[in-house]
Amino acid sequence: MKPAALHLIIACLGYYLAGLFGLMLAIPPGFASAVWPAAGIAVACAMMLRPAAVIAGVAIGSFSLNLGVISGNFSAFSLSMFGPALCIAFGASLQTLSGYLLWQALVKKETTLNSPKHIYQFLLIIAPVCCLVSAVVGTTTLALFGLVSSNGIAFTGITWWVGDTIGVILFTPLVLTLARKNNDTRTRATIVAPTLLIFTGILLLFLSSLKAHEKTILQEVKRNALYFQNKVHERLTISEHKLAVYSALYNTAETISREQFNRMSETFLRDDNAINAIGWIEIVPHEKRQAFEAAIRQQGYPNFTLTELTATGDLITARKREQYYPVTFVYPFPPNIAAFGLDLGTAANRLEALELARDSGAVVSTPPVRLAQAVGDERAIVMFLPIFDLNYRRQFHSPEYAKAHLRGYINGIFDINDILGDIFDEAAKKHFGIKIYDTTAPGGAELLISSGHKHRASTDPIRSQFTFGQRQLTLEFYANSHFHSNTRNWASWAILTIGFLLAAMLQALLLVLTGTQERIQREVARKTADLLQAKQDAEKASHAKSAFLANMSHEFRTPLNAIIGFTNLCLKTPLNDRQAGFLNRVQLASESLLAHINQTLEYSKIESHTLKLKCQATELVRIYGKLEAMFLLQAEQKGVAFSIELLTEHPRYVVTDPLRLEQILINLCGNALKFTDQGHITLRSTVTTQDDNNLTLRIDVIDTGIGIPPEHQQTIFDAFQQVDNSTSRRYGGTGLGLTITRQLIELLGGSIALKSQPGKGSHFTLRLNCKPAPSDYPASDAASPSPELSPQMQLKIFEENLQATQQAAGETKRTQTTAAQDATHDATHDTTKAPSITD
Ligand code: ADP
């Protein structure tokens, strides 16, 4: 199928089905629905599908739907209904087109509403304006075709517009959200679920309100039904009783003259317009017909003859019959002249009524009949009251007794319109309809009279039965469609309208929120990608820098080593004091420079993750001895005490990288010495936990120096960080020492902590997790002191050993920096001693 045709079918079906749903929400039943979802579906379809096909589909859908509504579900279909249905369909398509064009103009190509601006434009411009189109066209159509009364135009117009607007506001975004491809299920559910939930809640509330309203209406109808039934009943009973009064007149004399009858009737009927006519019927056997006719003619009616009514309603001379029941007197005479002489026994139903009246001795009425004197099509009830002779006694009544005493009948012609007219008028004013059926005949009900027939019944009729002139009558009472329109169900309308408006607002809010969230997510994703790229770039640059630093340090170190080596050699040649002084300074400066270069190289190696540890059995005591040898003299020269304390028993060997541990401790002690001008510096070593496999070594380096302010206690472990710039000016340094220290400690599987108070001193605590090494573990140094010796003794032995070594090398004085450099220096000259530094 071509897409255009498919789109047309989708729009047509969508509109039709949504329209059927909207009709369920119509209040009062009729044309304007409180919410018209079809309008929203149409605009959404136009946005997503081919607009031209959708507009055509909407026209067809709306046309069929409205044709169904106007013709009462096609039950009363006629060609004249095409006009209004076509016009309304035109309005619906025009609304869809204007909605589409407005959207294109304001929201542009997007088929989603996620920015507050677009949502406001949709709520305040697109939906209300496009719905105005169909409301105006639709209401004008209904008014022109007379489908809505003039005083209902404004109401219909407003509810039409409000209903369509809510339909568009609620359903267009709903459909677009559901149909949007790049919406995930969660987004769809976030927007659609709360709306649908509220929607269902409102529907339930609406239906219960509708039910409550219907109940109220039904109660109102029932109350009125009872009132009008009583009135009708009372009116008919009075009429019946009025006829009975004539038996009193006929009980006064054997014969009643025409004058007496007329006088009585005149008085009696003066104020009663329900009784059209009163007649006196005599019973004339055929053999007395001529005498009877002659007698009447003599009374001043020369043309008098017995007549009868044919089936076609013509009045002819009465045909021969055994017995005649002619109307002998009739009042008022002029309008009823046609009945004068009419034999009532000719029609079977009348004869039946006459005989029943005689046999029962009570008033009997005929089924509704067309009277001989009738001008229009109106029906009347003819009632017969049997009149007996003066000897008749009611208590002896039997059919034979009655036959023997019957003198004739009083017949009353009751025009039901006249009897009940004012009651019907009153009911019509209140928008109620009344129908009275004669249900005496078992075959079926014959409609006697109906009021309010112009308007459809909008409730099931309330029925009641009663007897009138021995006939069974059924009264039907119902409220007509105008009754419903006049008792407008504002509560239900308000529930639907306000409820759906709230739902629409909630939906708009959700659209804004999800739209904003979507935008934020997009932005975050973009920024994260940028940051990731920037981070990668920075890392690359940092690596390049570290590599460059490593290379350069390495390159600097080779010529520097040559300078130091040759200076040393030169110092061993015969020199005068001045030359020796110069060369000593060159030596000191070069060694200091080498220390800095080594530190930089170290840092860049750690940064570029190329530093490798070499763990081996390490004799701690040996390292401590070396430190004491390094710092004791310098401290003494500064007037500061320096001590190393071993608080617990230490294993002889632990597995760690001796070179790095030494480097760490040299750095910490070096800093302590550098920043302490009086007091003492203590290195305290403790084995805190130990078992066969693990050992925790805690080393505290405590000084009474300048201390570190709290705000710098974390940052000093970062690269190039010093407490302040004056530190570097006064004490020198690169700010790399503690950084390298911390990183080395972490590489060794330990941690470092600092406690310090400015002016009071600093306390660095280093915790190392190592393993106790078995005595046969490959040792770092073969010439280690005997493990049996106490630490104090070991220190002494070390001291002696080291002093001997230093003396041999002619190095009696060493600075912290030269000590640091020492390890590396050794490494450059004797690769077997410090294999862990891998350039
Ligand atoms: P530097 O080469 O500058 O000494 P470090 O990383 O070793 O670099 O030290 C960083 C800074 O931390 C020092 O400049 C100093 O301000 C502070 N610092 C380190 N140790 C101590 C200490 N024991 N007493 C006081 N300040 C210290």
Image (tube, rainbow, N blue to C red):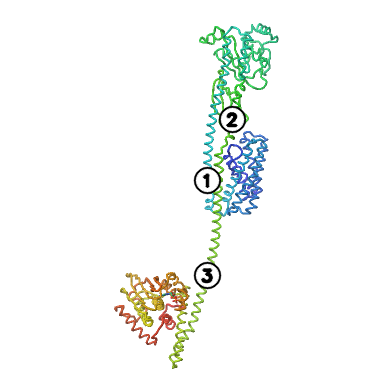
Amino acid type of the residue tagged 1 in the rendering: Ile
On the question of residue 659 being in view, the answer is no
Residue 403 circle label: none
Between tags 1 and 2, which lies in front?
2
Q: Mark 1 or mark 2, which has the lower sequence index?
A: 1
Between tags 3 and 2, which lies in front?
2
* Mark 1: secondary structure: helix
Of residues 224 and 208, the one drawn nearer to the viewer in this rendering = 224
* Mark 3: secondary structure: helix
- Image x and y of residue 774, in percent: 33, 74
* Mark 2: secondary structure: loop
Tally of marks: 3
Q: Disc 2, ligand 1: is the CB inside 8 Å?
A: no
Q: Which residue is mark 1?
A: 198
- Image x and y of residue 511, in percent: 56, 52
On the question of residue 272 being in view, the answer is yes
Q: Mark 1 or mark 3, which has the lower sequence index?
A: 1
Between tags 1 and 3, which lies in front?
1
Amino acid type of the residue tagged 3 in the rendering: Ala
- Crowd around label 1: few <14 · some 14–19 · many ≥20 (10 Å): some
Residue at image coords 33%, 84%: 800
- Farthest right residue? 303
Residue 538 circle label: 3
Q: Which residue is mark 2?
A: 430
What's the CA distance linking mark 1 and mark 3? Answer: 53 Å
Amino acid type of the residue tagged 2 in the rendering: Lys
Figure quadrant of residue 748: bottom left
